Image: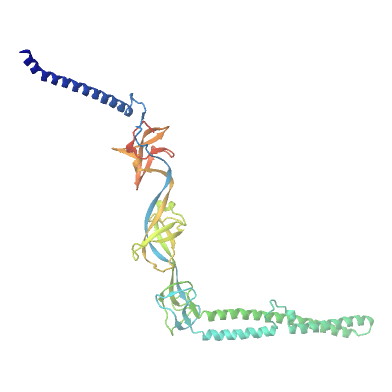
Amino acid sequence: MSPLPIFSLKTPLLIGTCGLLLAAVVYADDLAEKTTSGSAKVSLGFSNGAGAETARSATAPKPTTVVVESVNRNSTLRLTGSLIADEKADVCTNVNGIVKEVAVDRGSLVETGALLTQLDPTDAQNALDEGTATAEELKLRLGLNDKETTYKPENQPEVQSAKAALDLAAVNHKRNVELVAEGAVAQSQVDQTKAEFDSATQRYKLALHQARQLHQSYQTALVRLASLRKAVADTRIVAPFSGWVVEKYVSRGERVSTMPVGSVGGARIAALVKVDPLRLSLTVPQQSVSQIKEGQTVKFQVDGFPGRDFSGTIRYIAPSVASDTRSMTVEAIVPNSERALRPGVFATAELQLTSQTAELYVPVSAVRRSEDVAHAFVVKDGVIREKIVSVGETQNDRVQVLTGLGVGDVLIRNAADVKDGEKI
């Protein structure tokens, strides 16, 4: 009976031992499978020897690339300046007279040819009427009409009469010369007809001379007539250009003169400024002068219109740089049809400048920075190669590359996702 209890006591121990052995075998098989699979994955990620090229995992996304191109960098030059009138003038009188009417006041907006002041035209009109009568009288004496464009003194009645007398004297004298040769008349008759012929010749010449003098007097009368007409017209003092009246200097009833005391010109009637267009005068530092060209657009703002942009076109660039400030004056023409802007207003302007030399700019993400060193990755023959580059300023999402890259290089857009030697 004793063997049975002994078997009964060892049976649980034997069963437990077998279970442990079976678990160990299963764990060993699983570990071997994992080790084999893990070794295969590592071999795809790393090279077996130093310096060998590696390939990216088939499941990894292909990196995007950009081509390095040269660009002319744009920059903004901020300037200050003032708006000035395109034209300004003190309008003066050309004739003496008494102010009959003042048609404008300070602040009046006038168009070209608008009446500023009317002088009393009575004296000027009387002189014009007299001159017209004189010219008409001479015209009648000359026998002219409005259809004739040229004057021939031979057509003057006095000249024609003198010419007829001359022709008759010439015939008589010729006949007597022929008769005296035949002995039909005395020599005294020949001498008499010769004297008559000479006298007729002088009367004809005098008639021609007087006719020419009369015509010259008529021409002088016409010139004076034009001057008298202008004198009448000058009693109307008008605006020489469209603009604002900034000052008036005369009042109704005041006498004005073409040579007032202490003046080198006629009496001033009004001051006028042209406001459309205006000119924007800017001072540009000499280092930026070479980048400014006629025809460029300049944008500016003024305090009276916050948030509103105005623009003009460069029309004048000073031919020299000021030696004291090392700057140059530039003027832009500013349309002002709405007349919102006024001369004298202070302006802040922006002028877009374009660099004359080509520069390289790449996306910021294409450059990896490690302490003080910048790296970029280019693709050559399907392999990613790391390059050390030097960079300049950053503009928005692009950075300037000074050295290390060239135009046409194919660059990895996101440098953080790649490493040197990878194939793509």
Identify the residue at horizontal 34%, vertical 43% (top origin): 364
Q: How many marks?
A: 0
- Quadrant holding the N terminus: top left
- Quadrant holding the C terminus: top left
Q: Is residue 320 left or right of residue 35?
A: right
Residue 233 shows up from this direction: yes
Residue toward you, 202 or 230:
230
Residue toward you, 153 or 226:
226
When asked about the image quadrant of residue 11, the answer is top left
Q: Is residue 401 left or right of residue 184?
A: left
Residue 217 placed where, x, y %?
65, 81
Residue 195 shows up from this direction: no
Residue 166 placed where, x, y %?
80, 82
Residue 46 placed where, x, y %?
32, 27
Does 69 appear above or below 109? Answer: above
Q: Residue furthest front?
A: 1
Q: Is residue 267 left or right of residue 57?
A: right
Residue 337 placed where, x, y %?
44, 68
When asked about the image quadrant of residue 247, the answer is bottom left
Q: Residue furthest left?
A: 2
Does 216 appear above or below 424? Answer: below
Identify the residue at horizontal 92%, vertical 82% (top origin): 179
Q: How is the image coloured?
A: rainbow
Residue toward you, 72 or 230:
72
When asked about the image quadrant of residue 342, the answer is bottom left
